[in-house]
Structure formats: C-alpha cells, structure tokens
Amino acid sequence: MDILGVLAVLPLVFLRNSPDLQQTKQKVSPPSRAVRAPRGTTSIRPFQILSPRGMLLPIGDVSSAWRGTDGIIYVNHQSLELLGLTVTEVEHSGAIELSAGGIGRVRVERTVAPGRQWDGMLKLSDVANATKSRIFMDAKLPLARLQTAVSAVFAEREAIRISSHLPIRPILVRDKTTGKVIVDIPGATIDDVAKPTLPDGAIYKSIRVGQYQENIARVVLEASDVDKFRLLQGESASEWLITAATAEPLPATVAVAPRALASPIIRSVALPASTAAFMTPVTRAEALASPHGVDFVIEAGRLPWFRPVIVGNRFIMDINVEDPNGMLSELFSKIDNGMLGDCEWKSGVGWGGRLTIALNQPSRFMVNVDPKGRIKVSLREQIGDEASLPLAGRTILVDPGHGGSGSTGTKGVDGRLEKQNTLPIAMATAARLDALGANVVITRDNDIDPGLKERPAIANRVDADAFVSIHCNDAVRSSSVNGSLVFYHMDSQPCQELASKISDRLGTEVRAIKKLGIRSDKTVYKNDGFAVLRLSTSVGVLVEAGFMSNASDAAALASPPTQQAIGVAVANGLLDYLTSNPERDTRYVKGKAPKDVQAEPGELTPPSDNPFIERDGIKTKVDK
C-alpha cells in the first residue's frame, strides 16, 4: 500500500450509519526495544513519521527521520517540534528535553546515527518510551506511526475533559438525527480509560468511550441539544474540552509559529461548455477524521467541474453540483475542528455552488478524484518556514496513467500491467509534493480510468502550475531496450526544461533504472504529440519510468522501494523546475492568457467557447 493509501485508511468517521464504538485488539511493538526498519538492505534511507498531531515529516532533508546502517530508526531532534513537542537542548549534556502537556518534561539522550554522522539524532524507540507512545511500522513502506494513549476522560463541571500523553487533534461531529455528539481522536488508544460520569446539566443523557478503529479513539455523548456542543483546547494540545457552555472561539492549535504564506494569484476560469448546461445532484457527503487535518467527500452522479483555491485564510471551492436535499449545508454545520473556522455552503453561485471554509492556520489541500463522481478534499495544516515548504501555494496535478479494465496499459515480461505500477509511483510523487507544501490533485486513486481527455481537463480546471503523467514504456522490437524517458510537448521550451529537471533527478536518485533522457512527443505523433500533454494548458510532461518489456526494468518497476524512489525523483524534478525561477507563471503556457486576474475568485460565468481545447479541428487519437 502506498503512503497516501495508508493515510486514507487509518481514520474514518462518518456522521450516519456507522457503529458508535467498535473494540479492536491492537498489536504493538515492545516499547523498550530499539525500533528497527523492515528487513531489507541496510543502506541509509529517509523515513516518515506520522504522529497523533498528524504531521508527516518531510523526507530527503535534515529535518527527517532516517534508518541508520544498523537498521535502527533515528530522528533529528529539531523535527520533533512538528509532533507538537517542545524541544530544549540541555546545556553541557548529551541530552534533549522534551515536554508536552500530557507527559510533562522528559529527557532523551542524543546519539550519532551510524552512516550519517550527526550528533543531534535520537532513537525513535527512546522518543516513544519517553512520551509513553507506541510505534507501528509499515512492512513495506519507510513509514513509522506513533500512537499515543488517552490517559483520562472525565466530567469537569458542565464539560468533558480529554487528556492524552502526546498532543492530539480531535474532531467533533454533531448528529441531530440521533441526538449524538461524536468525538474521534485519530492516532490514539483509549482502552484503559474508565467510563466517566456525566457532567452537570440536564442536557447530558449518556456517555460512552472506546476504541472505534485500531488508530481512532471515540467518545460518544447523547444530549438533548447537540447544536450547542463544541471542542475547546485547554492549556495545551494534550487537553481538550467537550462543552455545551458558551465560550470563546476555538484558538488555532499550532505548535510551531507558521510563516505567513502569500496569497496566490487567482484567475477567473470560465465553466467549460461541455458541462455548463447542467448540474449534477449531490448523492452523498461525509466528513472524515484525518491524522493530518480534515477530509471532506462529495459524491455526485458524475464527476462535476470543480476548482479549489486557498485565498489568504480561506479555502474556496466552486463546484457545479446542486444540493436539493441540503446535505452539504447540513454536513458543514456539524464540523468542529481546531484547524477550521466557519464553514459555509452557498448554492446558486454562477453555474453551481461555493464552499467556503475559514482556516485558523496556514493550510494546503490535496484532492483525490474518482471519475465515477467522487471528490475527496483533504485540508492539511501548513507548518514550517520557506525552506521546508518551497512549493507552498503551488498546485500540481499528478496523473497515474491508465486504469480500469479498458485501459490497462502495456503488459510486462513479468505479467504485470502498466496500471499496477503507475499508481504507486504517482502516489509517491504526490506524497513528496505534499511534504514540500504543494497543493496536489490526483486524477485517480484506485483502479479506474478517468478517460484520455478528462485527465488534462482536470489540470485545467484546477488551474495547475504543472502537470505530470506517469507511465511505463514498452519496446516491441527489442527486449534489451531499457531506461527512463521523459517526454515534453512538441517544441515547448518550458515543457522541455521541466522534462530535463525530472530526467536529471531520475538519473541521480533511481539506481535500479538507467536514464535515457528526454524526447519531444512529436517523435511519436509528429503532428500533435500526446493528447494528455496537448490538451493541458499548463506546463506538463509524460514520464516513462522504465521499459516493462525489459526484464531488469520490469523487476525494478514492480519493486516498492524503486517505485518510491521514482516518485520522489519526479517530485524533486518538479521542485527544481518551479523553484529555479519562482517569478515565472507556469500556467497557460500553451494556451491563451486569461482575460482577467483578480485577488480572489469571482462567480462562474457562462463561457463563449470551450477554454480547455487548445486547437479546434484536430482529431484526438486514443493515445497517451
């Protein structure tokens, strides 16, 4: 399973039709033992750590966790601030002092990671022991998850107090239908907590606590007026109150002071003619508790036109759906989370509706698209400085090639289908871009085909800064041909430059597959190139990660470590391109410039033509 898949399945909460509590047994690592990575090579390798606070530490730099040559996981002590911990170096000592509301002050000895001679490293096992947390290791991915414990749930006057060892970010959902207030705590266990007594006040009817899923603790209140309930943070992010009393608005729960991110230039994009004549009704809407923030899922009868942006401290998404049953309005009135402020759904904006969410702290988004009609929006906290978030404010579309039964792609000598390799590679690319601070949109996250024209159309709709389509190659005439190729569109100089940056990264970071270089797509289709590149108005490339017709490449492409390395290399190439000239506007490089530029999006207006087709009269071939 890829990293984003791990994130998606960890915490799942919906408002209706789900059991309140479901006890599960947990398999945990012995807390006193030094944590070793899954078996494999003993080379130095970056690791990612997922904490109850939801921060997935970036990979590839000094603020990372690493596996040493001894197989033990080490973490740079400065990175622990992103877990919500206060980190202090003890003078004239080899120790680091960690502190948080739920653990007080604890001391951890510094060490040197074998093979990476830094003196500021800590053993992840020592950090877990000191913070009373457990470690779960992924068997295939370089990912370690810290799980904290809820130490107490008890009545406090007219409220319920939740205490934990490590900082957490609970999410509260109000369900008027059942009269329940559900509070989920991702990244936590609650097994040993006694059932609390009810607080004072006639509004409370009953309370239950338990383990909803392996990585989600749950508190359920039955009350007479669920609309009054909210979450309030206590003195630290390890202390939270569930209360119906009138109180000050929830403050932003930020462990590290975020930098002020400049608002991007927002363009007004006309609705495409192909969808302007109708709106599709919403069939399902739900909220998902997430370890990195809050997720929203909107499903409709078909994939709607949508456009997400972040303007200042607001997330805005225009989407051409109608909500006759008020599902969206009801959903966004129920959410209470420290990352979000007011949520509003407004129908009748232009050709659709507008979702506006106030953000209590700098944020970024990730959008997963299912061509059947599902859009999943993940709002994620943006904590760090300019150096650690070089792609903040940028929107990048990642397209895993092929998918479904009708577009399986080439078949390798090992029997694997191209679609089976492109998805994990693309997900690794998306994970790396997300860690760099980018807004990421993924055209598919499961085995389904978005359609040849729909892939670049999504990039145009979201106003992407860059577009990358991931594929694997096939040499029909010779099984000895191998290596990675990056295609750019026709004679586009910006696309050629992006292709060079990605190819260079593939050559230096992916040892299992050699670099063949870059090539124009006119060498394949001399008149119009690849459809996915031609129909995208932003700068874009098509990456052929290797030849599935070659035994060596095929074996590497099927290997999860190589898939991860390819994905990270592609993302790093995008990083090199987008930061080499930060003032360059990479959008609309192959199409006409937009008619107007404004500080924030205006209402959608009927188009005079279809802005997503660059040239009329050209037959689109069924190709990549």
Image (cartoon, grey):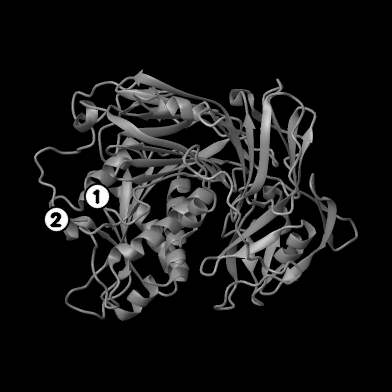
Which is more toward the observer, 483 or 307?
307
Residue at image x 59%, y 63%?
47
Identify the disc placed on residue 337.
none
Residue at image x 73%, y 44%?
195
Label 2 element class:
loop
Q: Amino acid at mark 2?
A: Lys
Which is more toward the observer, 268 or 448?
448
Label 1 element class:
helix
Snapshot quadrant of residue 480:
bottom left
Residue at image x 76%, y 34%?
234
Snapshot quadrant of residue 562:
bottom left
Q: Which residue is mark 1?
A: 532
Q: Is residue 119 visible?
A: no
Q: Position of residue 376 (x, y in %)?
A: 42, 42
Eyeballing the image, is 32 above or below 52?
below
Residue at image x 35%, y 65%?
421
Which is more toward the observer, 595 or 249?
249
Q: Which of marks 2 and 1 precedes in the sequence? A: 2
**Label 2: how many Cα within 10 Å (few below 14, some 14–19, many 20+):** few
Snapshot quadrant of residue 429:
bottom left
Q: Nearer the viewer, mark 1 or mark 2?
A: 1
Q: Is residue 296 visible?
A: yes
Q: Which residue is mark 2?
A: 526
Quarter of the rendering occupied by the C terminus: bottom left
Residue 590 falls left or right of residue 362:
left
Residue 481 falls left or right of residue 442:
left
Q: CA distance from mark 1 to mark 2?
A: 15 Å
Q: Position of residue 611 (x, y in %)?
A: 23, 32
**Label 1: how many Cα within 10 Å (few below 14, some 14–19, many 20+):** many
Which is more toward the observer, 83 or 249?
249
